[in-house]
Amino acid sequence: MQTSFFPITTLLFLLLLLSTAQYCNAQENTETPGTTLVDKTHKEISQSLSTPARWFDNFFQDPRLDEEIAGTSLRLRGSLIAEDGEKLSFKGKVKAQLYLPNLTNRFHLILSSEDEDLRDEALKDSRINQELANGQDTSLALQYTQERNTQFSLTHRIKIDLENEFNPHLGSRVRYSIPIAQESLLTLTQAVFWENKEGFGEESRIDYDLPLNKSMLIRTTGRGFFSESSNGYEWLTMGQWLQSFSHKKALAIGSYVVGETRPQNHVTEYDSFIKYRQRIIKKWLFIELKPEVQWRREKDFDPTGIFTLTFEVQFND
């Protein structure tokens, strides 16, 4: 059963390699007759379609954007978590990104205790959930941005854990956005890495964004993860409806299914959630309310209610 997932990952990886080659070739030959207009039109459509998606990603602080933000920033998050059958708990997170202008304007130093890369809060599998329950590490990373724009990005990162025997991590990440029928946007993201504990691995993600208007977006996401120590091929599918009411408040309603292929191919978790986020008092202060219901295999898929209240402070240059 496990091998049936690999053609999907292989196909996505080949598509990204082809897209990268085409993009680099276009960058080197922008003055070639017959291609300038096509490239310009493609870029304009990509930018117009990505505007709603990028706004929601920025407002909800999607971890994918952290690798592409150019500048210095600091984000502090404190969350109170109430879960059925568990004591009230508190989780604090910090992420500091320092821009290093003297190093060719492409380097950032990143200190973080947040979930990294594609394995963000909404895309945790059961193995990662267990690791987070046992404690979360703080990491320090040096990131090099080779290319970054609305359509394409390529970043490389060296990272160590400051609280977990260093656990060195080397990785690269490429993103390519493709407009579909001038109405929607397909974004392919591929990461490859080596980590001391995980070994060699890869993460693949496909997002399809359909803007209904400037304030409403429907998004479907497919995600896959595999490493030498993973539970086979770990996958997730998610659907979301996102609505902004102003530049200060927005709502996300969604659900996802998580599964793995080892020791056997099965679903490990279902989840439905509502996330309401609003700026309060100041433009850099946020409050976030997130009620959700989870059905986990480890609990025989009995429903578990969870409510998370989060306060967030942002500092940006």
Image (tube, rainbow, N blue to C red):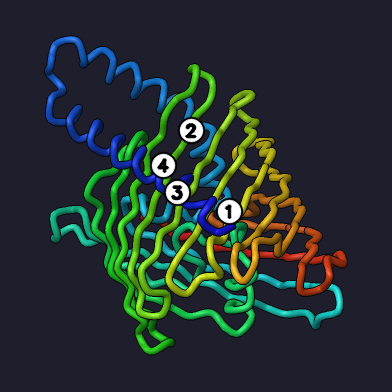
| Residue occupied by mark 2 | 186
At 53% across and 55% down in the image, what residue appears?
284
Q: CA distance from mark 1 to mark 3?
A: 43 Å
Q: Does dot 2 land on a helix, a strand or a loop?
A: strand
Q: Amino acid at mark 2?
A: Leu
The residue lying at 16 percent from left, 23 percent from top is 30
Residue at 36 percent of width and 68 percent of height: 200
For this rendering, which residue is in front, 150 or 32? 32
Q: Which residue is mark 3?
A: 9
Q: Earlier along the polypeptide chain: callout 3 or callout 2?
A: 3
Q: From mark 3 to mark 2, how far is it between C-alphas?
A: 16 Å
Q: Secondary structure at mark 3?
A: helix
Q: Which mark is residue 11?
A: 4
- Closer to viewer: mark 4 or mark 2: 4
Mark 1 or mark 2: which comes first in sequence? Answer: 2
Q: Residue furthest top?
A: 34
- Closer to the camera: disc 3 or disc 2? 3
The dot on residue 313 is none
Three-letter code for the amino acid on which mark 1 is drawn: Lys
Query: Which badge, 4 or 2, is on the more N-terminal residue?
Result: 4
Choose top left, top right, bottom left or bottom right for residue 219. Answer: top right
Q: CA distance from mark 4 to mark 2?
A: 15 Å
Left of 129 or right of it: where is 299?
Answer: right
Q: Amino acid at mark 3?
A: Thr
Between 177 and 280, which is closer to the camera in this rendering? 177
Q: Earlier in the sequence, mark 1 or mark 3?
A: 3
Q: Quadrant of the N terminus?
A: bottom right
Identify the amino acid type marked 4.
Leu
Look at the numbered discs 3 and 4 and tell me whether their residues touch, using CB distance below 8 Å. yes
Q: Residues within 10 Å of mark 1 (few under 14, many from 20)?
A: few
Look at discs 1 and 3 and give the one toward the viewer: 3
